[in-house]
Amino acid sequence: MIRVVQKTDITKVADIWLDTNIKAHNFISAQYWESNYEMVKEMLLQAEVYVCESNGEIQGFIGLNGDYIEGIFVCDRLQSQGIGKLLLDFVKESRKQLSLNVYQKNTRAIHFYQREGFEIQNEGLDEATGEKDYVMTWR
């Protein structure tokens, strides 16, 4: 089931955010993600966030800022089981277009988004990490 995030979900959602970022972005120091953990918890309370839940367990979530996807995060042990696609399809139903940034070194995510109809528009640099990224869009 996909639903709007609740205040009581924030710690679990932030934990998924932290764990997923550390594992998916091993080219960025874990300390970078850990140092942003508390700020992310605050931002999650103010963002448009949907969680995928099964049997009372949050499996993953998607965060949005208008038509911009801040990220899709799925529990490590549940990845590649269609949860990210479910979350993405859920938000596609209510939007005509979506965009996001993805690190160029995160080839798994790039392939996922391309498979879901996103196209690379241009490349840039994430100033916070110094890593190159792509802007990808879906229409």
Image (cartoon, rainbow, N blue to C red):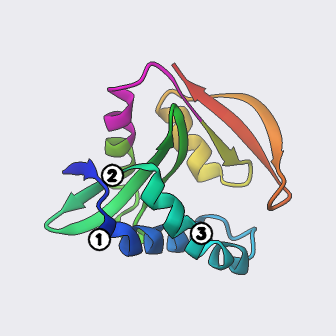
Q: Which residue is mark 3?
A: 39
Q: Total label count?
A: 3
Q: Secondary structure at mark 3?
A: helix
**Tag 3 near tag 1, CB within 8 Å:** no
Task: Decide whether residue 92 is among the magenta residues.
Answer: yes
Q: Which residues are magenta?
A: 88-99
Task: Decide whether residue 41 is among the magenta residues.
Answer: no
Q: Secondary structure at mark 2?
A: helix
Q: Which residue is mark 2?
A: 83
Which of discs 1 and 2 lies nearer the camera? The answer is 1
Q: Which mark is residue 8?
A: 1
Q: Residue 67, image x and y in percent? A: 51, 31
Residue at 13% x, 66% y is 55
Mark 2 and mark 3 lie on one chain; the one further toward the N terminus is 3
The span from disc 2 to disc 3 (Cα, nearest Å) is: 25 Å
Residue at 74% x, 48% y is 104
Q: Which mark is residue 92?
A: none
On screen, residue 2 versus residue 39, left or right, reads left
Kind of residue at disc 2: Ile
Kind of residue at disc 3: Met
Residue found at the far left of this picture: 55
The span from disc 3 to disc 1 (Cα, nearest Å) is: 17 Å
Kind of residue at disc 1: Thr
Q: Residue 10, image x and y in percent? A: 38, 69
Which of discs 2 and 3 lies nearer the camera? The answer is 3
Can residue 127 be seen? yes
- Using the image, determine if residue 100 lies above or below residue 19: above
Residue at 64% x, 72% y is 36
- Using the image, determine if residue 72 lies above or below residue 19: above
Give whichever of 37, 135 is nearer the camera.
37
- Using the image, determine if residue 7 lies above or below residue 105: below
For label 1, count other residues whose C-alpha is less than 10 Å away and answer few (under 14), some (14-19) or many (20+).
few
